[in-house]
Amino acid sequence: MSGPVMYFDCSAGAAGDMILASLLDCGASLEKIKEKLSMLPLGGYEIKTFKTRKKGLAALQFQVIITEQQPPRHFPQIKAIINSSTLPDKVKEQSLAIFQTLARAEARVHGIAEGKVHFHEIGGVDSIIDVLGTIIALEMLEVDLVYASYLPLGRGWTVAGHGKIPLPAPATMEIIKNNRIPCYGLPLEGETVTPTGAAILATICRSFTPIPPMIVEKIGYGAGSKEFDYPNIIRAMMGTSRSGTGKTKTDCRKGTEEGFLTEPLEILEANIDDLNPEIYDYLLNCLFSSGALDVYFTPVQMKKNRPAVKITVLSAPHKSHELGLILLRETSTLGYRRLSAEKVMLPRIQKIVETPWGKVRVKIAGSSPNYFNVAPEYEDCLLIAQKNAIPLKKIYQEIYAMLKNI
């Protein structure tokens, strides 16, 4: 069992205010969020929440009311606002990543540089509050993992500063494309997923999937501002991950097995024969710090008998575009391969084992006697070996003996 998990059921769509409202309805404190938001050098707004009903379902609605004229803000100005605050670094980093996603999409749609993108179209202050408020709320709820459903998309037209634009909004579709978010169409005239909503989910979600194995402990309903033929809400489900409790089935080459966990995965590959070897360590750190699940180098033989290195990067689907850009920017490759795959995992838990020399964290995967593995944490064992001047393998042997009958 791991820490708190959040799942967003986006059956009716997603917008920034809806996401934040659902987190507030899950138990995040509005007063504490307001206190954190006051750290931003930003004024001229008020926050209002109230209970409403959407087709008979009770939900919380979140509104940002503008009380003073706001200037159009470009991306660098929003970065300055966030960076100059005294908010925690993690909140700043995730919020900036969301606005980076928005700026990249808007720049591509309008054919301008990212630094020239202004956020008048997506609300300015509204978007800043929705984005920062969401990240603060998730931090407050101590959520470890975030997932979301596939995104439903309406159709038709809406009016923006440049005139009529098609739905889904071009920026929304650009974000969905760049982050490979699964989506589907609804027979509905209207906007269901906003650029801000798409950018938030693209940045915070580990994957877009059916409800993962979890024990649901809280449910929050965030209301949208529009009226459809069905409840315009987003549903946030908060709980704890339960490895293996759902008896998830996965079809493998050897047949259908019980108890596996699965999630989508993308594999990036590039063959390189002309890169300075000193750069590989730097590249490795860049990829891991940007969210790669794993990175490894394989020696290969290329055309004309040239020795080369195949770089392989394992990535969550929504991170693959960003990691691919790192390969193009930091190496000499002219391109890379991107393959869609599925990660199949044993359910796992972590135990603390008391050895004669101290505590050691141990990962236990699967259910005895089938698919059962024990993996002591190397760093814990190494520390004990160095401190007590005993062989590292003796610590492993001791742990395996203690867990033999688990």
Image (tube, helix red, strand yellow):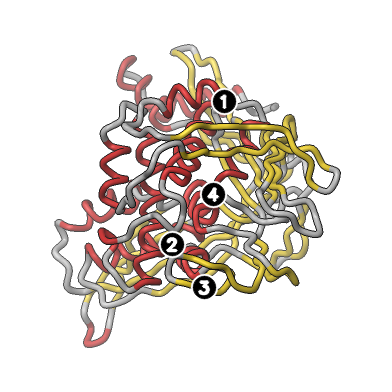
Q: CA distance from mark 2 to mark 4?
A: 12 Å
For image coordinates 47% across by 42% down, the residue present is 131
Describe the element under mark 1 as helix, strand or loop.
helix
Which quadrant holds the C terminus? top right
Q: Nearer the viewer, mark 4 or mark 3?
A: 3
Q: Residues within 10 Å of mark 3 (few under 14, many from 20)?
A: some
Q: Which residue is mark 2?
A: 320
Q: Earlier in the sequence, mark 1 or mark 3?
A: 1
The type of residue carrying mark 3 is Ile
The N terminus appears in which quarter of the rendering? top right
Q: State how far apart marks 4 and 3 are (Cα).
A: 30 Å
Label pair 1/3, CB-CB below 8 angstroms? no
Q: What amino acid type should be assigned to the residue bearing mark 1?
A: Leu
- Please report the residue visible at 35 percent of the width from the left and 20 percent of the height from the top: 390
Cα gap from disc 1 to disc 3, whole angstroms: 34 Å
Instruction: List x then y, in percent, for residue 359.
Output: 48, 17
Task: Return the disc, 2 or 3, that comes first in the chain's sequence.
Answer: 3
Q: Earlier in the sequence, mark 1 or mark 2?
A: 1
Query: Which residue type carries mark 2?
Result: Ser
The answer to whether the residues at label 1 and label 2 have Cβ atoms under 8 Å apart is no
Label placed on residue 165: 3
| Residue topped by disc 4 | 206
In this rendering, does residue 352 appear at all? yes
> Which residue is denoted by mark 1 in the rendering?
30
Q: Sequence-wise, which precedes: disc 4 or disc 1?
A: 1
**For numbered disc 4, what is the local secondary structure?**
loop
Q: Quadrant of residue 118?
A: bottom left
